[in-house]
Amino acid sequence: MSSSADPQTRESAEPATSIAQAPSRQAVAERQPVAAAGDRTRRSGLGPWLLMSPALTLLLVMTVVPAVHLFWSSLRNDTLLGGSGGFVGLDNYVNTLTDPGQR
């Protein structure tokens, strides 16, 4: 018998040429070496956050701080010129919701 007539010999000697004969991704992944416990296999997620921190700080200062100040001002009897009538709590909201002229 010649080696070309034997199908097992011929398949092992020739490279895989079709998709059906190509090794699966799982088989390829199983052949790759596993990293040691001390090796860094992945980048730290801290770098991007450090780069975004100035922008996130500016966003926080420009949106959240004014929103908290606005809510605090709504609980007081303040005027736009800086006069303060003191703390009134939710009375401003009650007056707005019950005033017939506001509907």
Image (spheres, rainbow, N blue to C red):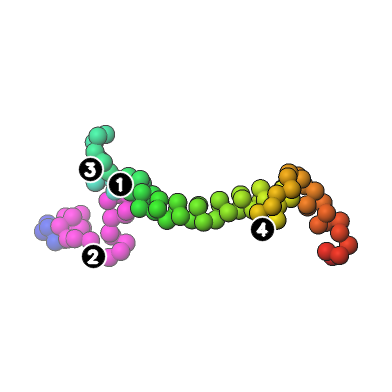
Quarter of the image for the C terminus: give it.
bottom right
Q: Which of marks 1 and 2 is nearer the N terminus?
A: 2
Q: Which of marks 2 and 4 is nearer the N terminus?
A: 2
Q: How many labels does the image show?
A: 4
Residue type highlighted by circle 3: Pro
Residue type highlighted by circle 1: Arg
Q: Earlier in the sequence, mark 3 or mark 1?
A: 3
Query: Which element is circle 4 on?
Result: loop
Within 10 angstroms of label 2, few (less than 14), some, or many (20 or more) residues? few
Q: Report the Cα–Cα distance between label 4 and label 1.
A: 53 Å
* Residue at image mark 4: 81
* Residue at image mark 2: 17
Which of 93 and 29 lies nearest the eye of the viewer?
93
Q: Report the Cα–Cα distance between label 3 and label 1.
A: 18 Å
**1 shown above or below 88:** below
Q: Which of marks 3 and 2 is nearer the N terminus?
A: 2
Q: Give the range drawn in magenta.
A: 7-28
* Residue at image mark 1: 43
Which of 9 and 61 lies nearest the eye of the viewer?
61
Q: Which of marks 3 and 4 is nearer the N terminus?
A: 3
